[in-house]
Image (spheres, helix red, strand yellow):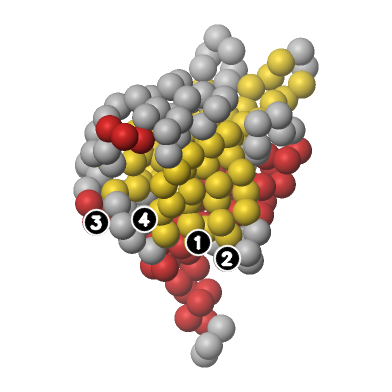
Amino acid sequence: MKYIIPALLMAFCANAQSIAEDTTDNDTGTRTVITKNFAAKEIGPDDTIARDGLVFFSAGIQQTKKANTTVEIYFVELNIVHSDSRLGCLTQGVSKIILELEDGSKMECTQISDTDCDPLGFKSAFALMPKGGTSLQMKQNFEKLKNVQIRKIDVITTEREVIYAVKSKSRQFIQGHFALLEKTFAK
């Protein structure tokens, strides 16, 4: 019985997320798949993954072909409502997040989206690798996130560092995003 309950919970969490975007650009052949973590039509405060603050989480994969080589970018998106103009900006190539995982390891992710200096909130994407990392490193980090939960998210802006503790009930839910992406991308 003790093995059935975690299996059922895992199955529920894997199905709780949904796909926000699954598109293919006809001109370039680039396919993008992004998850969403809210069930209603619009995101709400109950959908936050953080204990303190409004932090909303999505994950994605973008696949494109360049010179007969398939290139995949594995990333996470954070939508953070912060109302703190002292945080400065999230700047592409400079800002990053550090994911602290349940096994005690840390995963540095570099910002790949445009600079965001909104004094009320940020919406940014972060590749699953440090600046200067490799495609293989992104894929390995993606695989790890399917099996190890995220405990904290450390957001490093141009001015400060903010650490968000992930709610325990959100950890398995976040982990399910990566399994859903893999399943959707395989179609």
Residue at figure coordinates x 51%, y 32% from the top left: 95
Please say if 66 is above or below 172: above
Q: CA distance from mark 2 to mark 4?
A: 15 Å
Quote the CA–CA distance across marks 4 and 3: 8 Å
Q: Nearer the viewer, residue 47 or 103?
A: 103
Circles 1 and 3: CB atoms closer than 8 Å: no
Q: Amino acid at mark 1?
A: Arg
Secondary structure at numbered mark 4? loop
Which quadrant is home to the C terminus? top right
Q: Are marks 4 and 3 in contact (CB under 8 Å)?
A: no
Q: CA distance from mark 2 to mark 1?
A: 6 Å
Residue 135 in sight in this render: no
Residue 147 vertical position relative to residue 82 in the rendered view, above or below: below
Using the rendered image of the protein, determine whether residue 43 is visible from the camera's viewpoint.
yes
At label 3, the amino acid type is Asp
- At horizontal 53% and vertical 88% (from top left) the residue drawn is 2
Residue under numbered circle 4: 49
The residue identified by callout 3 is: 46
Residue at image position (38%, 44%) is: 36
Disc assigned to residue 102:
2
Q: Which mark is residue 160?
A: none
Q: Residue furthest bottom?
A: 1
In x, y percent, where is residue 51? 33, 61
Q: Which badge, 2 or 1, is on the more N-terminal residue?
A: 2
**In the image: residue 71, left or right of residue 9:** right
Above/below status of 47 relative to 117 = below
Q: Quadrant of residue 20?
A: top left
Q: Give yes or no for contact between labels 2 and 1 (Cβ–Cβ under 8 Å).
A: yes
Query: CA gap, disc 4 to disc 1?
Result: 10 Å
Q: Nearer the viewer, mark 2 or mark 3?
A: 2
